[in-house]
Image (spheres, rainbow, N blue to C red):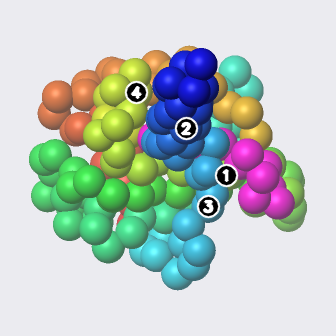
Amino acid sequence: MKKNVLVLLSFLLLSSFVAVAWASAGTGKVSLPKGYERWEKSKARVNTDRKSLFYGIHYLYVDKKAMKTYKKGGIYPEGSRFVAVNYTIKEEGGQQVAGKKNMIVLMQKDKRQKASGGWLFAGFSPDGKLSGLDPVRDCYGCHLKDPQATDSVISKYADFK
């Protein structure tokens, strides 16, 4: 009887450890990188396709680890990060300008994310809370266009500045 209880307790303890390790490898503990606003920032990009997830005006922020590869091309080092901040479009003086912030998306190189090509994708609301964006359906599907040549990064440095 004691042996069965010890085996059961050992199993429960091991299961708990595995569950915690598995959860921390997923997107459950993802948050926006602190200070991303101080990373290199792109010029405004306007997307007027109302069917697009990125309809609006957005800016791309690229961290130092990713920037070197972003400039020259190739495979990004583990931990490379991009943050896209999207705004609504509003008309001001006959021009399209950024309105209210409506979405933030993180793309981080993470080899554990097998279903999305080794990239972690996470969507956030304007106040920084996880939005429930599906990383495979809503993000990676578009990033599959030329994954070999660009390591699944869609934008080009030439369009950045």
Q: Which mark is drawn over residue 32?
A: 3
Position of the N terminus, as image quadrant, is top right
Neighbor class of circle 1 (other Cα within 10 Å; few <14, some 14-19, many 20+) is many
Query: x, y percentage for residue 54?
Result: 64, 37
Q: CA distance from mark 4 to mark 1?
A: 18 Å
Q: CA distance from mark 4 to mark 3?
A: 19 Å
Q: Which residue is mark 2?
A: 13
Query: Foreground: 52 or 89?
Result: 52
Distance from disc 1 to disc 3, alpha carbons, whole Å, reads: 9 Å
Q: In the image, what residue type sits under mark 2?
A: Leu
Residue found 67% across the figure and 51% down from its top = 104
Horizontal side of 52 relative to 137 (left or right) equals right
Name the element at disc 3.
loop
Q: Earlier in the sequence, mark 4 or mark 3?
A: 3
Numbered disc 4: secondary structure = helix
**Residue that mark 1 sits on:** 104
The residue where tag 4 is placed is 116
Residue sitting nearer the eye, 135 or 86:
135
Dot 1 or dot 2: first in sequence order is 2
Q: Residue at x 25, y 28 (%)?
A: 147
First of labels 2, 4 by sequence position: 2
Three-letter residue code for mark 3: Leu
Q: Choose mark 2 or mark 4, whichever is in front.
A: 2
Q: Which residues are magenta?
A: 120-130
